[in-house]
Image (cartoon, helix red, strand yellow):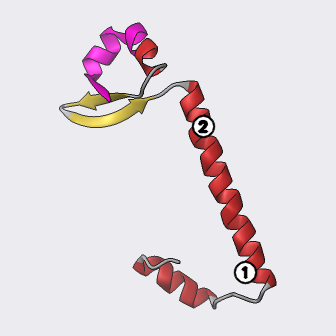
Amino acid sequence: MEALSANEAKTQFGDMLLKAQRAPVQINKNGKPVAIVISVDEYESIESLKLSLLQARADKAKGDINNGNTVAGESFFDALESGQHD
């Protein structure tokens, strides 16, 4: 992935947009990554994947509820806080 400083991104904005159509472009500020510029197609693809994952999780939750596979709320939140998950 190509990386540009924030100043380079500002002064070469048009060129950066063209590059982002082909591959993500990382923007660094003070030598640290702060943003990634991606194409609209890439963004829409990511959003679609996120929606599909969320839909699959909701479907699984509905199935678990219908099958009586539930846990007490307190246990759920204790596991969530401790970082445990299925």
Q: Kindly identify which numbered label has been placed on residue 73.
A: none
In the image, is 1 to the left or to the right of 65?
A: left
Q: Amino acid at mark 1?
A: Asp
Apparent side of residue 3 relative to residue 25 in the rendered image (left or right): left
Residue type for callout 2: Ser
- Which quadrant, please, contains the N terminus? top left
The local crowd at label 1, few if under 14, some if 14 to 19, many if 20 or more residues have their Cα within 10 Å, is: few
Q: Residues within 10 Å of mark 2 (few under 14, many from 20)?
A: few
* Residue found at the far front of this picture: 22
> Which of pointers 2 and 1 lies earlier in the amino acid sequence?
2
Q: Which residue is mark 1?
A: 64
Quarter where residue 75 is shown: bottom right
Which residues make up the magenta segment?
A: 1-16
Question: Does the magenta-highlighted stretch encompass residue 15?
Answer: yes
For this orientation, the residue located farthest to the left is: 31
* Residue 49 rendering spot, x and y as whole percentages: 61, 47
Q: Is residue 32 above or below residue 10?
A: below
**Quick check: 25 left or right of 57?**
left
Classify 34 as above or below 80: above
| Rendered location of residue 18, percent (x, y) | 45, 12
Q: Position of residue 28 (x, y in %)?
A: 26, 30
In the displayed structure, 54 sits above or below 86; it is: above
* In this rendering, position of residue 48 left or right of residue 24: right
> Within the magenta stretch, is there residue 55?
no
Total count of labels: 2
Residue occupying image coordinates x 42% and y 76%: 83
Residue sitting at x 56%, y 34%: 43
